[in-house]
Image (cartoon, helix red, strand yellow):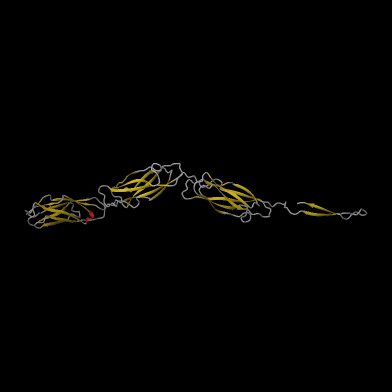
Amino acid sequence: SPGVLTFEHPTVRVLEGSVTARIPVIRVNGSYSPITVSYRVLGDAASPYAKVTGQLAFLDGVLKQEIDIPLIDDDVRGPDLNLKVELYGPSLKTDIVGGLCTLTIVDDDMIPGYLELENAQLSVPEDIGFLQVKVLRREGHDGQIRMRYKTTPVTAQPNSDFSPTTGELIFEEGEDMKILKVDILDDTLREAPETFRIELFDPSVGMGVLNFRNRGSVLTTDVTIEDNDMIPGYLELESSQLRVPEDAGSLLIKVLRREGHDGQIRMRYRTVPVTAQPNSDFIPIEGELVFDDGEGMKVLKVDILDDTLRESPEQFRLELFEPSSGMGVLNFRHRGSVMRTDIMIEDNDNDDVRGPDLNLKVELYGPAFFEPDIVGGLCTDHRER
C-alpha cells in the first residue's frame, strides 16, 4: 500500500528569527511506490506568506519529508503570526488525513531589558528613618520580568541597626523603576559606621518573554549607616573685647570648643587692622586651628610692638572664619557667637619719664653797697626724679 499522508504535528511554533520554518509531513499505513502531494499557505492575499506553495515527493519507501517556509524577520515588535498550512492534490494512489497544520511564527523582537540597582554604595545618617533604594530596568521594557531581593548584615545588626527585608519585585510591561524601602533604626550610642547589604538575585520572566539577559552588573548595594550621636561642638573666641598695654610683649587669646568634643573640627583665623598698624603696633597672624577629637581649647599668640611715641589707644581685630569638619563628623553647627575679638592697645609713653637724679647749683651774688659780704654763696638743690 502507498499509505496516507498527514502532518506529523498539528501545530508548529518557530521564532521569527529562525530563518526557515520546517514542517514535517509523514506517510503512514504504507510506503509502497512513489507519491506526491502539494502544499500551500492559506490566509490573507496581502500576507507575504500567501504565495508560499510547493510540492513534496515521496520516493518508494520514504516515510517523511519537510515543508520549508522562508521566514521574514522584520525587527519590529508585533503580535505572533498564525498561519494555516494545507496539504492538497495528492497522487491518485494515496489520500490525505489531517491535512491542516497551524504554524505560529513567534515574534522575537521583544526587548525585556534587565534589572540592576542604581548604586553600588550608599551612606545614610542613623536618624534618617528609612532608606529608599532604586531598582532600575535598563535597555528594554517589554514583557514582565521579576527579581528577588534581600538584606544581608555585614557589621550592622538586623533589628538593631536596620529592619531586614526580603521579597520579589515584579516589573510589568513598560515599568522601568521600583523602590525598595529599608527601615533604619536609631539609637543613642556613639559608634563607628556600620554596614549592611541589599542583594538582587534569582531573576525570572513572565510567560512569553524572550531575549531576557537575566541581570545587570550592579546586583548589590553596600549601605553604610553613619552614627548621628556625635557631638562635635562649636568654636568661638573666649572674649569679644580685650585691652593690652603697649609694652606687654604679646597677647594670648583663647579659642574654645563648646558643647561637645567629638571628632575633628577646624577654624581659620586672621588679624585685621582697625587703627593699629600691622608690623608697627602688632605682628599680623593668620592660619588654621585644628581641634582633634577631645580637644577643648587652643591659644593664639599675637606679638604687640612697643614704641616711644605718645599716642591714642589703637585697635586691631582677631577674627575666626571658615569653619569645617573632619571626615565622618556629623552634627557640626559650624560656629559660635563670639567670632571676633576687638583688641585695644593702650599707650604707655607719658611725660613721667624716669631718669637720673638732677643736681642744681644756686648762687648768691651782688650784695647791696655797704652791706655785709657774702660767705658760702653756693647751695646745691638735690632733686630726686
Which quadrant would residue 60 be assigned to in this image?
Answer: bottom left
Tell me which residue sits at (80%, 52%) in the image.
382
Left/right of residue 186 with respect to residue 102 in the rendered view: right
x, y percent for residue 244: 64, 49
Q: Position of residue 32 (x, y in %)?
A: 7, 55
**Snapshot quadrant of residue 366:** bottom right
| Residue name at image x 58 percent, y 52 percent | 271
The count of marks equals: 0
Q: In the picture provided, is 60 more to the left or to the right than 211? A: left
Q: Nearer the viewer, residue 113 or 99?
A: 113
Please say if 183 is above or below 268: above
Q: Position of residue 202 (x, y in %)?
A: 30, 48
Camera-nearest residue between 336 and 208: 336
How far across and down, in percent of the image, does residue 191 sit? 45, 45
The reply, left or right, for residue 51 in relation to residue 179 is: left
- Left or right of residue 248: residue 264: left
Q: In this view, which residue lies farthest toward the right?
A: 370
